[in-house]
Image: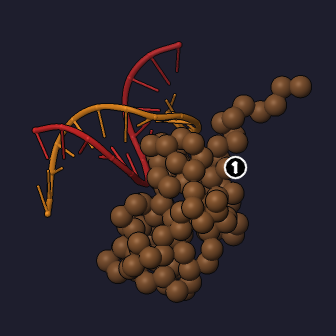
Chain colours: A brown, B red, C orange
Amino acid sequence: MKEKPDKRNFFEDVYQVVRLIPRGRVSSYGAIASYLGSKGSARMVGWALIAAHPFSASQIPTHRVVNRLGLLTGKQHFDVPSAMQERLEQEGVRVQNDKVVDFDQLFWDPAKELL
DNA sequence: AATGTGACACAAT
DNA sequence: TATTGTGCCACAT
């Protein structure tokens, strides 16, 4: 039987990893992409989150995924732009000027933590 | 079928 | 140090 191509798998893979991000922690697109094997295709992770948008709010903590600089680049895609920052602060992550404070410290790398 | 767009990342200038 | 340009892969039109 022919199974579904890997395309679908990519999205699910992203969802899995994002879902594994501990509360109060954040990850980056590139880190996830690298972990999936598509090193450099961080954009696809972002796309996956957009596709996950309807899912995420209640299933996947997409607000814990930011760019490598700790900037909440995707907040604009939330129902409410401030929702992303609100949720992060609610989990103990301080956000200043749309950027995660101590991002380096809160950074959760699947390639290492999930090893 | 082909082109453009996109929640990024990195190298070069 | 900041800015610009290119690479990456999948989806939308």
Chain of the residue under the numbered disc 1 shown in the image? A
Give left or right: position of A78 versus A70: right
Residue A108 placement (x, y as % from top left): 53, 68
Residue at 45% from the left image edge and 43% from the top image edge: A40
> Which percent across, then down, holds residue A87?
54, 79
Nearest the viewer among A25 and A85 is: A25
Q: Quadrant of residue A32?
A: bottom right
Residue A65 seen by the camera: no
Image quadrant in which the N terminus of chain A is located: top right
Mark 1 closeness class: few <14, some 14–19, many ≥20 residues within 10 Å: some
Q: Is residue A85 left or right of residue A9?
A: left
Q: Nearer the viewer, residue A73 or A9?
A: A9
Q: Secondary structure at mark 1?
A: helix
- Image x and y of residue C9, in percent: 53, 34
Q: Residue at x 57, y 50 (%)?
A: A35
- Please tell me which residue is depicted at 36% across the width and 73% down the height of the picture: A99
Q: Which residue is mark 1?
A: A12
Q: Is residue A115 above or below residue A94?
A: above
Q: Is residue A101 above or below residue B6?
A: below
Report the amino acid beneath label 1.
Glu
